[in-house]
Amino acid sequence: MLADVQFDVYEQAVVCTVTGEVDLSNATQICDAIGEATPNTALGVVLDLSGVGYLDSAGIHLIYRLRENLRARGQKLMLAIPADSPVQDSLRLASVTRHLPIAPSVEKALVGVAPPAASPKDSDRDTPQGEPAV
Amino acid sequence: MTTGSPHLEARPPGAGQVVLPPAASFLAPADQLRILSGLSDPALSEVGLEELLDEVLVRVQQALDVDTVAILLYDPETHQLVARAAKGIEEEVEQGVRLPLGQGFAGRIAAERVAIAIADVDHADILNPILREKRIRSLLGLPLVVEGDLIGVLHVGSLVPRTFGERDLAVLQVAAARVAPGIERARLYSALEREHRLAVVLQRSLLPRELAGVVGVGVAARYLPARDGVGGDWYDVIELPHGLVGIAIGDVVGHGMRAAALMGEVRFALHAYALEGHAPGRTLELVDRYVQTMRERPMATAAYAVFDAETGSMTLATAGHVPPIIFGPTRGGVIEVQPGAPLGAFPYGSCPEHQLTLASGEMIVMYTDGLVERRGTALAQGIEDLLTMVRGAGSAEQVCRSAMGGLVPPEGLDDDVAMLVLHNLPVPAQLRMHLAADPGTLADVRRVMRRWLRERGADDDDVTEITLAVGEACANAIEHAYSPGPARFELDATESAGDVTIAVRDTGRWREARGENRGRGLRIIDAAMSDVRLTPTSTGTEIVMHRRLRAV
């Protein structure tokens, strides 16, 4: 099993945690699964990639496609990727880092998706590192 | 050996029935006995029940000159007699006639264990309609008894009125005495056969159908049932996330279907906990907790190890299981591991973990005690023999072949045996891989690339970035490979004084980047590697790329 995907559905946001490796063989499936798991009522999705050890251009494509799909439904996407993650290397080599809404943790990414009051953890109100996609 | 001698009692017979006195004092005529004598042939106990019964019918029919002969076997579960073999009244068997004990001609013979003769069937209480329809006029029957247990009824019939006498009973008694133990043996044998066959099927279906193929790792396994049936030995190979491989072996004490079923339960529990990503010690502890909750708590042992082909490191834990052996070009021996308690042995048992590294080319052999346990020989000696046996083997498959060939005698073993071998395949310095153009192979390529790069002295950044670039080149080859047959592509990797050169050749045309998203693969390759060249070849496209390792 190359990767696993877990969903935590909160009232206003879905936190989707991917662990393992993401490549051409599973990127599309993961993207579709996230779309399926996100209710229309959610304000957006936090894609937690901190447990991902490998992400190729198909995985980057997944992020862009997911962002477009969500945008069409009026929903936001935030990525949770720590600075030392191998995913950061992929984004850097593909020169897409600055185009993507990235926060260093799920807590901070959630703030970017839902207003602080609606966030499941309201203790952490720092602004995310990247700008949320609107 | 006891005989089918009926106990005759002075009971009031039914209308027209005669309960015959003991026939022991009568001698059956010599020529009739000669016909029956073949029945004691010991070879009969080896043939199937059907053939044995058929033999009895023919000989009895001949010896007594009767029109019908039938054998009904007693089914202790339903307390019924089941028509099993018949001559002259074959319908009995075809229709699967079942008769209750205690009623009717055969039922009374069985329930009361007496021989009964009926001179005129029309006046008797015959339950079996087939006997009436056939217009059988006279009947003689007796119970088949082995060591005090009823196993059935043997009866003969005549279409012309005939008064069966004590001489006839004496002949039938000889036939019954000779054949009853044979029937019992054959029946036990076929029941065992059936149980054995079912257990083998069950065992097979509970073991992995094929071992997960992991590039860079050679795996082979064997399961051998015991001489007289399957047991609870098992093995498993688990493909874990992040390119890790789990290997497990175990033994649920016991034999037959029950052990096989329990084995399945324990194996699936371990497989599931392993997939959750738990380390070997914790995985075995969780299986232990699971076994504690099983209604029929089995005695079980297991060993579980997680292998990282990229680094050669292995984490191993055992729960009361014989320790695996490790061997390779430069060493060989038992892995000294502090064992955890057997599964389910006592509450909250813990399983310590042991770390080791498999050098390139080394193998680890997991096995169950059936392989090394010999009556009158110390276990350590058996393990020593195993080591000697497999020492020179060059592949995991060869290890299995040598061990099974050298340690299992031709007549089989008393205990069942499972073994599982993992071989840390050496990665050649000049790497050349031919791969199916399938996205599923990308993970394999990465695993081999990372290992190859580490063995060339690459640091973490080198490994991450070169692996990404190679992954992109391969993904492109897979997406664009085109050929009439199953599409393939190849990868060459060489290194000289810290300069890495990698070539990926496919059988399709490099597709120009379409849109912003599609160009990223090539952008990653360009950013990670230097001197990237894309060349069309006669069959497809070749991409050659270089990088100077920073640490070398």
Image (cartoon, helix red, strand yellow):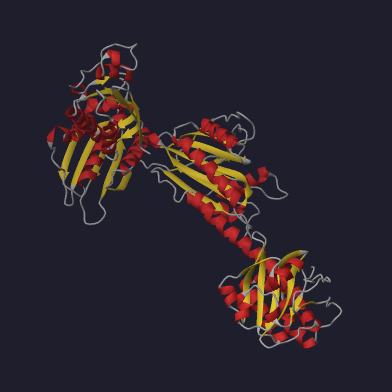
Quadrant of residue B120 within the rendered picture: bottom right
Determine whether, in the image, residue A14 is placed left or right of residue B114: left
Q: Which quarter of the image is occupied by the C terminus of chain A?
A: top left
Determine whether, in the image, residue B188 is placed left or right of residue B310: right
| Residue at horizontal 21 percent and vertical 33 percent from the top | A61
Quadrant of residue B115 within the rendered picture: bottom right
Q: Is residue B422 above or below residue A100?
A: below
Q: Nearer the viewer, residue B408 or B399?
A: B408
Q: Taking the image as drawn, is residue B327 in sight?
A: no
Determine whether, in the image, residue B173 is placed left or right of residue B304: right
Residue B110, position in %: x, y? 72, 68
Q: Which quarter of the image is occupied by the N terminus of chain A?
A: top left
Residue B128, position in %: x, y? 63, 74
| Residue at horizontal 24 percent and vertical 26 percent from the top | A91
Residue B356, position in %: x, y? 51, 33
Please, which residue is most extreme toward the right here?
A: B25
Q: Nearer the viewer, residue A86 or B377?
A: A86
Q: Taking the image as drawn, is residue B190 in sight?
A: yes
| Residue at horizontal 24 percent and vertical 45 percent from the top | B478
Residue B77, position in %: x, y? 65, 59
| Residue at horizontal 20 percent and vertical 18 percent from the top | A131
Q: Is residue B29 above or below residue B114?
A: below
Count of numbered circles on the image: 0
Q: Nearer the viewer, residue B364 or B287?
A: B287
Determine whether, in the image, residue B324 is placed left or right of residue B313: right
